[in-house]
Amino acid sequence: MEETAYLALAEAEDHGWYYRARLEAVETLLKRFAPQRSRPLRILDIGSGTGGSTQRLQSHGDVLGMEPSALARELSQKRFPTLKVEPWTIDELPARAPHDFDVAVILCVLYHQNIKDPAAALQKIASVQKPGSILIWNEPAYPFLWRQHDRQTAAGRRFYPRSMHQLLHEQGYELVFQSHLLGWAFPIACLLALKDRWRWGADRQTTSAEEGSDHKPVPGPLNRLLRWITFSEWRLSRLGLGLPFGVSHLLVARRR
């Protein structure tokens, strides 16, 4: 990711409607599906970025973040000095990390262009989890939604939900919950993707990082409204009333 993207991400994690709604969803799933232990849960936050998710997860157990970007770790340290974050890549997990994590969290990491093989990455993650532990995983969905924001965040792919489910099955996980996020925004994302393809195909010129970014702040009242809509829609999905599409896909799987 570009430096401007990490700086924008740090701001968005604190106040942005999408990040706050997604973390609320993740915490709800953690409370519902995490294995019961007499000791604090051991949680691994993979690709902890600028620290917002890692900080929130601390209220649920002992959290270890891992983030290979020096800039992201620097921002995380400035914002949350008490967080424990290691500079590991996913490839380094089996050799460096403990092998008894109760929960692993992946929030938009395996889409990145530095991840050459998502299946191999999931295999590494599975190697540090015991049977019965859970994985909470969220990624951008549907390749046809690709646009400037994906380029600006160094995305290498978007996932079809069924391909995420297949990857989990192949690496020894059992799917226990799935839902889309941002179903209400799906038509908007389709239009933006079409607009981006037309512009990109017309002049082959990249736009500025800020023009293509989804991290732009919005006014407070609108920010609160969008957060409420996003989380409320997701809560309906828990009751089987969610939309069959969305801008990203969120799931929980249990290690077999």
Image (spheres, grey):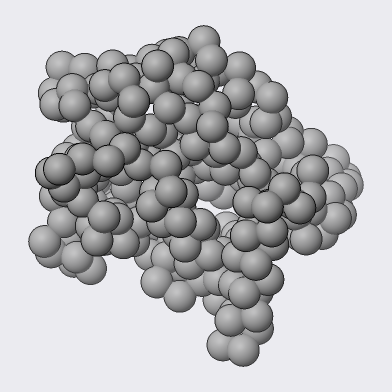
In which image quadrant can residue 104 be found?
A: top left
Q: Measuring 26% from the left and 34% from the top, which residue is drawn there?
A: 102
Question: In the rendered image of this protein, does residue 163 appear above or below residue 17?
Answer: above
- Where is residue 27 shown, x and y percent of the image? 41, 56
Could you tell whether 127 is left or right of 84 in the image?
A: right
Q: Is residue 59 above or below residue 39?
A: below
Taking the image as shown, residue 29 lies to the left or right of residue 144, namely left
Q: Which quadrant of the structure image shows residue 187?
A: bottom right
245 relative to 80 in the view: left or right = right
> Residue drawn 69% across and 24% down?
162
Identify the image quadrant of residue 172: top left
Residue 171 percent location from the top left of the image: 45, 13
Could you tell me if residue 65 is visible in this image?
yes
Residue at x 46% of width, y 56% of height: 28
Which residue is drawn at the image coordinates 76% and 59% (left, top)? 185
Q: Nearer the viewer, residue 242 or 76?
A: 242
- Along the viewing direction, whichever of 169 and 16 lies nearer the viewer: 169
Percent of width and height locating residue 167: 55, 17
- Of residues 59 and 31, the one nearer the viewer is 31
Residue 16 in percent (x, y) is at: 51, 71
Q: Quadrant of the C terminus?
A: top left
Q: Is residue 89 left or right of residue 145?
A: left
